[in-house]
Each structure stands twice: as structure tokens, then as C-alpha cells.
Amino acid sequence: MSETTPTATAAASGASATERFLTDKTGTPAEDVDTARVDTLAAAVITAVHDVIRRHQVTYDEYNALKSWLISVGQDGEWPLFLDVWVEHVVEEVVTGSREGSKGTIEGPYYVPDAPALPSVATLPMRDGEAGTPLVFQGQVTDATGQALPGAVLEMWQADDDGLYAQFAPGIPEWNLRGGIVTDDEGRFAVTTIQPAPYQIPTDGSCGRLIAAAGWHAWRPAHLHLKVSAPGHQTLTTQLYFKDGAYLEADVASAVKPELVLDPRPSGTGGNEVTYDFALAPAAL
């Protein structure tokens, strides 16, 4: 990353992620809460914490350090980052474990809806001279039986060559490397973009302090984000990674699955190309 590259601070990224979550996601309305379910889940989480305290003989100094850190996570606006990095992959595993079709994985904190609509053969919005290796990403969207899904939508977003996301780092055009691609009459698409870089989650806030204190690393492998949807089918949220890429075996977010690893080939025009097909499960009854 060059000296002139914008910095994505934890405070700015956290504020953006929190605002985006509160805008786009809604919880269960208070009047519809299943009190028995809340009782079961809340009691189980609290009991698990009690078990950790007893098993590891937690001291008051450690308890107060935890309490202070939890307060700072909220003050830093990093709850979306913390939950998406260390918790979401298990929720995704439980929710989609028996679903037909292609594998999914976590959404993460950097999704933004309503990206510009693009035709089936398109180039993601990018800056003049966008850094990075050119990549043509192509394939087909079908249902779980292999029938093409014309007019399916692939919402696609990714980091740039510096590992930064538009709308979450300063100085990047609003929809840079974001778009909603509509498949053709055979469910096919071909998108020109750049191959993203691995990146660190922000480390100058509370999540970074946890990572440093535990001796962990903060890196995510390079990946493309996608939400693939079609009428009458379940939306697939996934990420696609790159063979032999750094951190595939040690993703801080634990989101990599073998089925999601791409194997790019030279395109003959100075870049790479890759084909990946998506199969969508039918909508739940």
C-alpha cells in the first residue's frame, strides 16, 4: 500500500458498517418475539460464559479488562465487524447446511444494496487505470436441477488492489468495484474486473486490540463477494477465493470453503480469466 493510499480506520469503517446494518437489516419486531426462544438462547449464551469463567478461573482483573473491551467495541462502532468476523460463519453454516445448490458463506460488513444495474457482459465500475491484474469472471446461473435462470441478478462487490472497499474507505468513488449484473437468456454472465488483494481487517480499534493481545493475525484472503438471486429461488450469498492465495488456510473470518476456491488461468491479454457456475435452491415453502 503506497503512502498516498487512503486509510480505512476502524472508527470510520465501524461507523459505516453500523449505519449500513441499521439501514438495511431489521430484527424481529418486539411484538413478534418468541419469548421461549429468547429464554433458550440467552440462557445458553450466559451459561457458556459462566462455564468459561469457572473452567479458566477468570480473575477480577481479567473480568474488568473484558468489560472495558466490550464497552470500547460499542464506542468504536465495531460490533458489526466483530460479529461478522468471528460469529457469522457459524450462523451461515447452521442456516444453509441442508440447502441444495451452490455453497454460500458469510456476507461480511461491507455489502451495500442497490448497486448500479449492469448487463450480462459488463465491466464493474472502476477508476481510470484501476490498479490490479485484470480478471474476467464468467459463468452461468441455473436452478438446482441445471435449468438456466435468465434474468438472475449477481450483486458483486470487492476490495481494490489495496484491500479497500468503496463506501468504507475515503477517496474511492461511491460504486467502485460494485455492480448488479443481470444474466442473459441462458443465465450467462461475463464480468471484467480486477483481481482483488488480501487485506487486513481494521486493527486500530477494539478488534485490533483483541487480535494483538491474543497473538492472532488480521488477514483475509483475496475474494469476490456475491449475492445471486432469481425469482422463486433462495438468494445465495457467497465469496469466491483464489487458488494458492495467501491466508486461504488461515482466514481470520473462517469463511473459506474448498468449493469456493477459483483457479484463474491466463487470458492471453495480460490478465486472468475464470469460470464459475451458480446453482440456486428453490425458495422455501
Image (cartoon, rainbow, N blue to C red):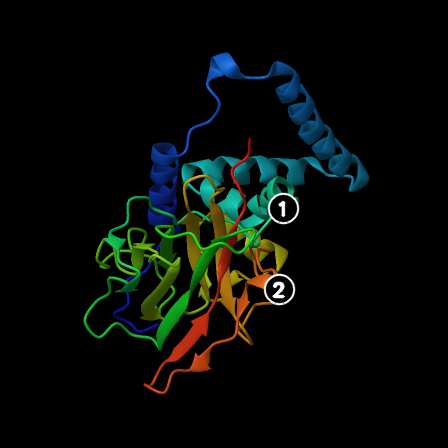
Q: Which mark is residue 181?
A: none
The residue that mark 1 highlights is: 93
Label 2 crowding class (10 Å Cα cut-off): few <14, some 14-19, many 20+? Answer: few
Residue type at mark 2? Answer: Pro
Q: Which residue does the image show at 36% across and 35% down from the upper left?
A: 24
Q: Which residue does the image show at 70% across and 34% down from the upper left?
A: 49
The residue that mark 2 highlights is: 258
Residue type at mark 1? Answer: Glu
Q: Is residue 112 visible?
A: yes
Q: Are marks 2 and 1 in contact (CB under 8 Å)?
A: no
Quadrant of the rendered structure where residue 177 is? bottom left
From the viewer's side, name the closer residue of 225 and 231: 231
From the viewer's side, name the closer residue of 206 and 244: 244
Q: Position of residue 147 (x, y in %)?
A: 49, 54
The tag earlier along the polypeptide, 2 or 1, is 1
Q: Position of residue 58 (x, y in %)?
A: 73, 39
Quadrant of the rendered structure where residue 37 is? top right
Q: Position of residue 171 (x, y in %)?
A: 22, 59
Q: Identify the secondary structure beneath mark 2.
A: helix
Locate the C terminus by quadrant.
top right
How far apart marks 2 and 1 lie (CA) works out to 14 Å
Q: Identify the secondary structure beneath mark 1.
A: helix
Q: Position of residue 137 (x, y in %)?
A: 39, 68
Q: Which residue does the image show at 49% across and 23% down from the upper left?
A: 28
Q: Which residue does the image show at 55% across and 51% down from the upper left?
A: 144
